[in-house]
Image (tube, helix red, strand yellow):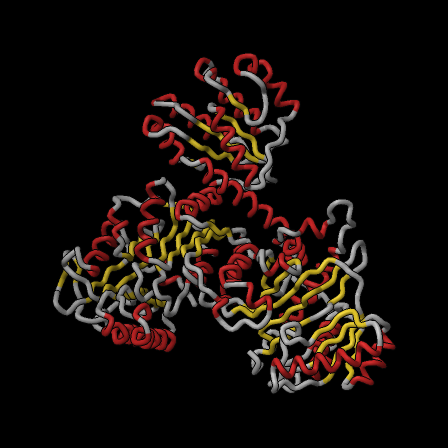
């Protein structure tokens, strides 16, 4: 859908306009004029013949001009008819400020569906309802009633701000502007009856005045659209910073697999954001401060940070935060040490952090010389300047030195200024520059860490495309998927895994004790015995599993015991026989699973087996299809990764085989996502060295499975 007429309108019709500037219709008109809108303003209200210098029209139909956007500020019961009148008139887009729709429940949802029907019938791009509007700063288009527009002037910049919350969005924009951070657009999406946040993101990723998008979101309606937009952001090299509020408990649904029971929707959002390079923050201040750093700073080559400070304690505080966030503070190069050795006699040891002490007061050139030396040090990728109590005109001079140095380098320079009002000349000078300013050391480091992670993400993910791990035997799989209403047993699931190149245990199905004995003889003792029943999902719970059976006599007894246990657990269970399975050598146990998320579709999960994943919730998630780097990140991301690497002299597990299995499961998830809602390989045994992996057990849950 073309959003040009909505975000860059040449004419606006304001339906529900008022002479009272305290009312929504009056306030929108006031702000349009106050902030210099240069297009045609067309007020609509049958009560007036004119408002100020503007002719007022009784209806949209009576306007003799082409209308790009209709600004609708009328009671909710009139909205559908006004929108339809606009459609017949040929209005290209609309903003609906009126409330009283889906936010009120079922009755409101019915009204909102009518808005969508009208918009789709006429091909109108509609923002809202229940929103505070849209503000274009560069094109001076203030189509909003938010009181943030009481500011005499909006600071233009290259950050677009999209908010699903109108009131909170306007309040945040006020803080953004107070911090001296400029924006290109502010978009309040409201209930998103037609257009959603991802639609505006897509437009703004192609906007030359926008280089960073920050978004305040409660949820994503169309996960597939969001994923496509996130990929576009990677292609454009334009970061998206998101504060996702609220946690929807997906665990409340009937989850049948271990994967489904452990992964809630917030974990899915977190995984998707990480996989697609979306920078997620948890606080309002971090939202706009991080966006500012991404908008202002060049991308660093790595995570090596230098600190120059006039406060030793401040350097220690920054160091602690940097180490906690995975950054490094390398030693300064020999060249830098040599350059600063003469000055060091006055202030101490040349090291990182570089503390200039109070000597910087006696030697005004010490600060710029030291800064220049640090930014030219090849062992550093970025520099943080920590200022303490520098007052008055001296603070402005110090800020000017920082700005000039930042303009001379391709390395990011961030400033934390600890003092308050006495340093206002300096801090104000920095706010008006392209050097990010912070009053909190922690927020400074978090923003720099986000910049480093995003830069690294583009290097590792920007060019790689997902590739098929295997080309499965489609005919063999199709045969296993029938009949579709019946649950799938372990042996059937194993055959699907095998079709995707995933190693499985040697096993045979026996329909009676004699067949089971013959199968055990062929496989070789000891063996495991498992019930095969479409109705039994978890065999251990039903008493349908026995391990380490060593003889025919044990088989005879165990077969009967399992049969009785299962019938006691579920009298209606259909028992197809027993699966005779080899007892595999011990290895590290991991779990790989698939869950079909309502918003995003197939998600692949990985974790260590046992208490690590079940109790400690130590797992990683990614959206399918995976890239190889995604799979490697999943493995390295879990807290138990060191166990797979090998501890206390143990040999490293076959990580490459795990990655290959993740890629195969990813392909399976994409191919069969319409058939299966959940899937587990649990456990997958992983062997040391190049020993590979082996699927010991698996569970497939069909989307129409009557057991769920």
List x then y, in percent, for residue 539.
66, 74
Q: At x 59% / y 32%, what residue is drawn?
A: 329
User: In which quadrant of the rendered image does the N terminus lie?
Assistant: bottom left
Vertical comparison of 537 with 334: above or below: below
List x then y, in percent, for residue 429.
38, 31
Q: At x 36% / y 45%, what residue is drawn?
A: 176
Quick check: 155 left or right of 330? Answer: left
User: Closer to the camera, 410 or 97?
Assistant: 97
Q: At x 17% / y 55%, what residue is drawn?
A: 21
Q: Which quarter of the figure has residue 617?
A: bottom right
Regarding residue 6, the answer to whether it shows in the image is yes
User: Closer to the camera, 68 or 264?
Assistant: 264
User: In which quadrant of the rendered image does the C terminus lie?
Assistant: bottom right
Vertical comparison of 686 with 371: above or below: below
Counting the numbered discs, the total is 0
Q: Which quarter of the figure has residue 381?
A: top right
Quick check: 476 left or right of 345? Answer: right
List x then y, in percent, for residue 207.
45, 54
List x then y, in percent, for residue 93.
34, 67
User: Closer to the camera, 393 or 581?
Assistant: 581
Regarding residue 435, the answer to whether it shows in the image is no
Q: At x 33% / y 53%, what residue is drawn?
A: 168
Vertical comparison of 577 with 11: above or below: below
């Amino acid at each position: 859908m073309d959003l040009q007429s909505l975000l860059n309108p040449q004419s606006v019709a304001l339906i529900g306009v008022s002479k009272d500037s305290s009312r929504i219709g009056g306030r929108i008109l006031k702000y349009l004029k106050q902030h210099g809108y240069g297009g045609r303003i067309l007020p609509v209200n049958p009560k007036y013949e004119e408002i100020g210098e503007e002719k007022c029209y009784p209806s949209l139909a009576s306007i003799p001009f082409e209308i790009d956007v209709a600004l609708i500020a009328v009671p909710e019961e009139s909205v559908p008819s006004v929108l339809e009148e606009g459609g017949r008139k040929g209005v290209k887009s609309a903003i609906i400020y009126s409330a009283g729709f889906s936010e009120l429940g079922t009755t409101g949802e019915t009204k909102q569906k009518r808005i969508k029907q009208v918009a789709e019938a006429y091909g109108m791009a509609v923002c809202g309802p229940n929103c505070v509007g849209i503000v274009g700063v560069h094109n001076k288009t203030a189509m909003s009633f938010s009181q943030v527009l009481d500011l005499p002037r909006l600071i233009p910049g290259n950050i677009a701000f999209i908010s699903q919350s109108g009131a909170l969005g306007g309040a945040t924009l006020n803080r953004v502007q107070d911090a001296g951070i400029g924006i290109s657009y502010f978009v309040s999406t409201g209930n998103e009856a037609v257009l959603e946040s991802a639609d505006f993101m897509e437009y703004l990723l192609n906007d030359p005045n926008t280089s960073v998008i920050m978004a305040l979101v409660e949820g994503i309606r169309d996960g597939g659209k969001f994923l496509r937009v996130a990929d576009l952001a990677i292609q454009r090299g334009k970061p998206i910073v998101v504060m996702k509020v609220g946690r929807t408990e997906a665990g409340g649904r009937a989850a049948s697999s271990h994967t489904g029971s452990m992964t809630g929707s917030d974990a899915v959002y977190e995984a998707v954001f990480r996989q697609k390079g979306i920078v997620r923050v948890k606080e309002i201040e971090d939202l706009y401060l991080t966006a500012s750093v991404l908008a202002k700073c060049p991308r660093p080559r790595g995570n090596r940070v230098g600190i120059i400070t006039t406060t030793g304690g401040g350097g220690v505080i920054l160091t602690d935060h940097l180490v906690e966030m995975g950054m490094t503070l390398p030693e300064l190069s020999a060249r830098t040490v040599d350059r600063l050795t003469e000055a060091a006699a006055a202030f101490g040891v040349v090291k990182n952090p570089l503390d200039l002490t109070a000597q910087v007061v006696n030697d005004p050139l010490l600060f710029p010389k030291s800064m220049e030396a640090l930014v030219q040090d090849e062992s550093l990728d970025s520099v943080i300047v920590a200022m303490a109590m520098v007052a008055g005109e001296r603070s402005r001079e110090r800020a000017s030195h920082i700005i000039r140095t930042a303009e001379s380098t391709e390395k990011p320079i961030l400033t934390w200024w600890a003092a308050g009002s006495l340093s206002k000349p300096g801090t104000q000078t920095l706010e008006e520059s392209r050097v990010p300013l912070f009053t909190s050391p922690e927020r400074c480091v978090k923003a720099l860490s986000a910049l480093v992670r995003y830069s690294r993400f583009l290097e590792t993910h920007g060019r790689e495309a997902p590739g098929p791990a295997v080309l499965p035997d489609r005919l063999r799989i199709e045969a296993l998927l029938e009949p579709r209403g019946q649950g799938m047993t372990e042996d059937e699931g194993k055959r699907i895994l095998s079709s995707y190149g995933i190693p499985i245990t040697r096993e045979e199905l026996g329909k009676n004790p004699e067949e089971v004995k013959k199968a055990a003889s062929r496989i070789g003792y000891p063996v495991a015995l498992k019930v095969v029943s479409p109705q039994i999902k978890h065999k251990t719970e039903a008493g349908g599993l026995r391990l380490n059976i060593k003889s025919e006599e044990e088989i005879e007894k165990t077969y009967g015991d399992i049969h009785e246990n299962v019938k006691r657990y579920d009298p209606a269970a259909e028992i197809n026989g027993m699966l005779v399975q080899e007892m595999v050598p011990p290895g590290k146990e991991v779990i790989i699973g698939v869950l079909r998320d309502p918003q995003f579709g197939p998600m692949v999960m990985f974790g260590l087996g046992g208490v690590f994943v079940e109790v400690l919730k130590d797992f990683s998630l990614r959206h399918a299809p995976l890239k190889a780097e995604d799979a490697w990140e999943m493995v390295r991301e879990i807290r138990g990764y060191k166990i797979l690497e090998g501890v206390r002299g143990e040999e490293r597990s076959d990580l490459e085989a795990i990655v290959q299995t993740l890629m195969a499961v990813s392909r399976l998830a994409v191919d069969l996502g319409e058939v299966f809602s959940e899937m587990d390989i649990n456990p997958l045994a992983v062997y040391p060295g190049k020993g590979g992996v082996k699927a010991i057990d698996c569970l497939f849950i069909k989307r129409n499975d009557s057991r769920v």
